[in-house]
Amino acid sequence: MPLQTCMDISEATNFESSLGLFLKPISKIKINVQLPKLSVPGQSISSWHVMEKLKETIRPDTFLYLKSLKITATVIKFEGELETKSSCERALARLRAAGSLKLNGFSERLQVRAAHATSSGPTRHDWESFFRDAKGVNEMKPGERPDTIHLEEVPVCWFTENGKFSNPSEKLLRKAFGTFGKIRRLEIPPKTTSESSMFGKTSSLHNDLLFEAYIQYEEYVEFVIAMESLRGKKLLYKEPDGKVYSADIKVDFDRTNYLSDRCIKQRAAEAKKSASAPENIKIAERDGQLEISQKSKSKILDKNSPTKLETKIRQPSTIDQEKELIEAQLLLKELLRRAEISERCKEKQLIVSSTSLQTEGKMSKSYSEKGAKTSEVLKENDKRQKSRSSKHIKEKHFHLYKDRNKLHKSSDNSSSSEERMSHKDTQKDRRHKHKNKHTHNQNKDRKKEKKMDKIKDREKHHQMRLEDKKIKERLNYLQEQEKKNKEKLLLEQERILKEKLIRNLKAREEQKLKVREKLRKKLAGSKVLKSVLASPNISLPKRSV
């Protein structure tokens, strides 16, 4: 928003009287106008006519500005600002009493609804939720927690020492915003062309430039007091002539960790890089000029032209020559070191290859000796196997003759042996069945035991889960209580600080009144003395000798 003249300062509060700065609450209202259905084709409603009707209804009060936020086929939403809160309430009462507007060309009346606009600016819930959900942030470090205010669209000429359009001074900013508490860091980022051009278009009174600033407080309570006192208010500046101007400054908490140690180091590194960039550009320009001069010389020699052209080559400075010599020496050292490393690697490879050849020769000799020995052993084994096979065949023939005689004898006793075998088989079957039943019962018992163990394990696991849940609930409850206690402590600290500020202000005012009364008494006494001394009729008493 551009700068505006302020006619009423009844609701303004003192911010820094030595700099002529005051704070004033913003009084805005929102108006919704419901549109009728357009029955005639080609018929339209002008938002300008609606705005004029709204201005007529609130007279004798006037809007500082009135603009349309949203226009649809059914509703037009307006936002307007008035001079004071009392005028805002009077305007709302008149709009609610009217209830509707009558436009020419429409039989139906336009219904109007108006209410107070919400105050702009973040609340405590906003910055607490932001830093709670932020990742990679350490609340123990300054700049990565809610302790920094970000100001935007602040006029430059209000914070300059000479009152001219120069750079704003950090000293005056520190003096103005130090009323809320001790400032740890304060930084004004460099200006951008977009901000200055945008403000040049919008400002209609002075064409002042704007700037932004980051202010970091030492304690959280001081940050909270500053945010609450600046939320929903505009900044006033009183000139020595008596004219008062207002500006809607944007106040927000730092969402980018601008004044954290990490970001400050990053900006310092980027500044070093940008400072070293121009030197590299100069070296490249010098090399380009040398190449161009050499090309021009070669062209002149090829053409064999009678005219002689003088080519001026800018010689490099002594500092550049020394830098080039140092770089060349470093390159030579690196090349020599690499050559030594390569020679060492080659020597190692030769040693490894020679040792491998020696080991191969020894292995070949050992294999040849072992081969001769193994051939002799194999021949002896073959002889032994042949002798054993002949003996084995003779033993087989002898056993066959014996088996034939036994078969003849066993045929007689076969009937009796069969009966005995059948009896033995029945007994074995009975025993086998009995064993099977016993094993089946044992398996059943084992399965039951396993099932019972599983059920017991499940119950134990369930109990453990319940215990864990109870512990977690207890921890959550304790954490919530700690948070509530912390919030209570912070609120008490804020209340105490506010009371201290009010007491200090009252004490200062009382001191000022006492000093004024003393001065008045002194002045009154001096006037009486002067009048007594000036009167000729009064005679002083004579001393008796």
Image (tube, rainbow, N blue to C red):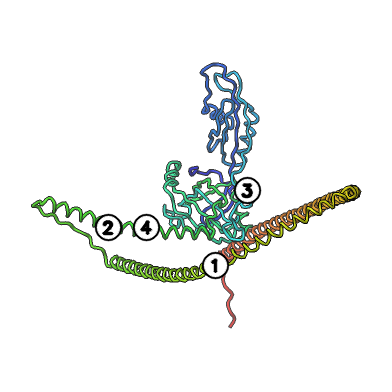
Q: Nearer the viewer, residue 449 or 31?
A: 449
Give the image location of residue 159, x and y in percent.
48, 54
Does label 3 or label 1 sit earlier along the sequence? 3
Which one is closest to the eye, mark 4 or mark 1? 1
The CA span between labels 2 and 3 is: 56 Å
User: Disc 2 marks which amino acid?
Assistant: Asp
Q: Amino acid at mark 1?
A: Thr
Q: 131 or 200, which lies in front?
A: 131
The residue wearing badge 3 is 126
Q: Is disc 2 placed on a helix, strand or loop?
A: helix
Q: Count residues near mark 3 (Cα–Cα under 10 Å), then give few for <14, some for 14-19, many for 20+.
A: few
Residue 187 visible, this angle: yes
Q: Where is mark 1, residue-wise?
A: 374
The answer to whether residue 227 is above or below residue 366 is above
Label 1 CA crowd tier, 10 Å (few <14, some 14–19, many 20+): few
Can you tell which quarter of the image residue 107 is in? top right
Viewer-proximal residue, 200 or 305? 305
The kind of residue on which mark 4 rests is Ala
Identify which amino acid the numbered label 3 is placed on. Asp
The residue carrying mark 2 is 287
